[in-house]
Image (cartoon, rainbow, N blue to C red):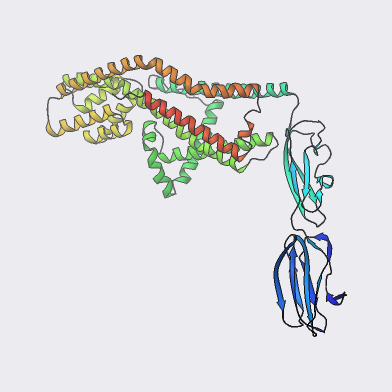
């Protein structure tokens, strides 16, 4: 609908109240106007002039935020021109800005908090709108422990709405009780770990003396035995399910040396342990978050799954490191026993069997396995090549190459093994001397590596909230990752400097 306004027709003469909608202006000149032009003035600056060479109507759309006025120049049939301006049009599509300045986002349970303190709302048209800010706060909001989100809302005259959310952490004001609970929880975890370690050592002792004793017929199993059986059943079921997939069988080849060294049923069983450990850590994290009445974030889920998955690799790597170290330390004794056997006229399979009977520990396991491989019909080269592949130490590789050459070319095996015996003995003496010379430097290195961890533990005990910014924001996680990367790089550099090749 066009309204007459001072000799012309226009749909909206002015829009003095700010609006967030587009302002559409329809202009129709009178019949005596032959041509006209108009210019849109935005925030005091003139835009492009539009010329209309007839008496037709025009539509002007104001869609951007700003203060507008439109200037028209009409030319009538007598070639007389007349200029006039419309009223003001205010278009506001910018939402207000909420500024929140909080000194602390920690609230003690049951305390009174002025949530409007440090809150300010500013609009480009209305100016300060702090008094119009509202929140979603309900009664007794800070009466329970946990993270509470407060959403601030403000709307300007044009109808633009802004939201801003702040998370408060409600903590128990009885810090001493919280500290005692944390100490009790840590003590319980340590107690469980001690019981598990003792049970594991008892199992090792049982395996060590099993071949010297009779197995009792026990009908009633202990709690740990039952738990162990259930655990083994779950691992077996998971491994059976994984063995159906080709990727699991291919991936399991990476863990074949662990499977052989630690007598696992198959390499897929190790993958099953990795997956189950990952799920266990995930459920443990969910349970811990539920006890704190919090939701587990996506990053925390990924971290829990990743830690559980990699923990099995770390355990097997450490076990294999000590296993290989034990074999390396006892290899000289095995060479001496084999050399004495050769001096007595025994063959290589007989010498290997004699080592498995005379020695104990991990070297006994390896030579017992080699003796069984001889019994199964494998050649000498194949048996020692499999031994070298399992252990992956230079001495075993050297022994394998020597025996392979002796089988192909012949020679005095007693002299060769006497030479190997002297070489390994000299190398062991040199290693012991080197360890004695570098022991003080290693102690200093270990102390330097432990200092950052001890410092972090001490700070956490003194101020439990000190390191919270590292785990409460994305930037904090990135900083923590950089710190850990630098720390690992520092350890690698120290290890590289201290390493002495023989």
Question: As rendered, which of 374 and 112 lies closer to the eye?
Answer: 112
Q: Quadrant of the C terminus?
A: top left
Whether residue 279 appears in this view of the structure is no
Q: Quadrant of the N terminus?
A: bottom right
Above or below, comparing residue 256 to residue 1 in the picture: above
Q: Measuring 39% from the left and 35% from the top, which residue is drawn there?
A: 259
The image quadrant of residue 287 is: top right
Q: Measuring 68% from the left and 37% from the top, which residue is drawn there?
A: 290
Question: As rendered, which of 34 and 368 lies closer to the eye?
Answer: 34
Percent across and percent down for residue 119 are 78, 41
Q: Is residue 187 left or right of residue 34?
A: left
Above or below, comparing residue 454 to residue 316 in the picture: above
Question: As rendered, which of 232 and 446 lies closer to the eye?
Answer: 446
Percent across and percent down for residue 483 are 52, 32
The count of marks equals 0
Question: As rendered, which of 459 and 314 lies closer to the eye?
Answer: 459
Percent across and percent down for residue 163 are 75, 48
Q: Measuring 41% from the left and 37% from the top, which residue is drawn there?
A: 265
């Amino acid at each position: 609908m066009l309204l007459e306004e001072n000799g012309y027709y226009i749909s909206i003469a002015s829009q003095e109240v700010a609006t967030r909608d587009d302002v559409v202006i329809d202009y129709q000149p009178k019949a005596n106007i032959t041509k006209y032009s108009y210019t849109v003035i935005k925030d005091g600056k003139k835009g492009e002039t539009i010329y209309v060479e007839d008496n037709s109507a025009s539509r002007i759309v104001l869609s951007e935020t700003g203060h507008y006025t439109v200037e028209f120049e009409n030319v009538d049939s007598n070639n007389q021109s007349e200029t006039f301006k419309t009223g003001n049009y205010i278009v506001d599509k910018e939402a207000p800005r909420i500024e929140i300045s909080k000194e602390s986002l920690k609230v003690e349970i049951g305390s009174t908090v002025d949530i409007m303190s440090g809150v300010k709302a500013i609009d480009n048209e209305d100016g300060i709108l702090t008094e119009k800010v509202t929140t979603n706060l309900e009664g007794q909001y800070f009466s329970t422990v946990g993270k509470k989100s407060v959403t601030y809302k403000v709307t300007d005259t044009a109808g633009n709405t802004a939201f801003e959310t702040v998370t408060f952490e409600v903590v128990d004001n009885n810090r001493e009780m919280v500290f005692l609970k944390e100490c009790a929880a840590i003590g319980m975890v340590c107690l469980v770990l001690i019981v598990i370690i003792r049970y594991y050592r008892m199992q090792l002792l049982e395996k060590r003396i099993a071949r010297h004793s009779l197995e009792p017929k026990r009908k009633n199993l202990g709690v740990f035995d039952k738990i162990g059986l259930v655990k083994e059943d779950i691992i077996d079921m998971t491994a059976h399910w994984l063995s159906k997939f080709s990727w699991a069988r291919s991936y399991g080849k990476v863990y074949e040396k662990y499977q052989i060294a630690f007598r696992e049923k198959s390499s897929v069983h190790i993958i099953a342990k990795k997956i189950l450990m990952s799920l266990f850590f995930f459920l443990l994290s969910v349970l811990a978050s539920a006890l704190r009445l919090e939701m587990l974030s996506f990053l925390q889920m990924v971290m829990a799954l990743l830690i559980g998955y990699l923990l099995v690799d770390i355990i097997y790597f450490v076990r294999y490191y000590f296993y290989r170290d034990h074999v390396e330390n006892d290899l000289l004794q095995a060479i001496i026993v084999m050399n004495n056997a050769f001096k007595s006229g025994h063959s290589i399979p007989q010498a290997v069997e004699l080592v498995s009977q005379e020695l104990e520990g991990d070297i006994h396991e390896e030579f017992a396995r080699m003796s069984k491989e001889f019994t199964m019909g494998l050649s000498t080269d194949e048996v020692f090549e499999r031994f070298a592949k399992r252990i992956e130490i230079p001495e075993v590789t050297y022994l394998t190459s020597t025996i392979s050459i002796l089988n192909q070319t012949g020679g005095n095996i007693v002299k060769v093994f006497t030479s190997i015996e002297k070489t390994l003995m000299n190398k062991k003496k040199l290693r012991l001397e080197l360890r004695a010379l570098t022991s003080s430097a290693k102690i200093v290195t270990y102390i330097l590596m432990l200092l950052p961890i001890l410092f972090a533990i001490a700070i956490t005990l003194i101020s439990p909230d000190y390191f919270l910014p590292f785990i409460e924001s994305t930037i904090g996680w990135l900083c923590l990752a950089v710190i850990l990367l630098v720390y690992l790089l520092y350890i690698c550099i120290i290890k590289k400097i201290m390493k002495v090749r023989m």
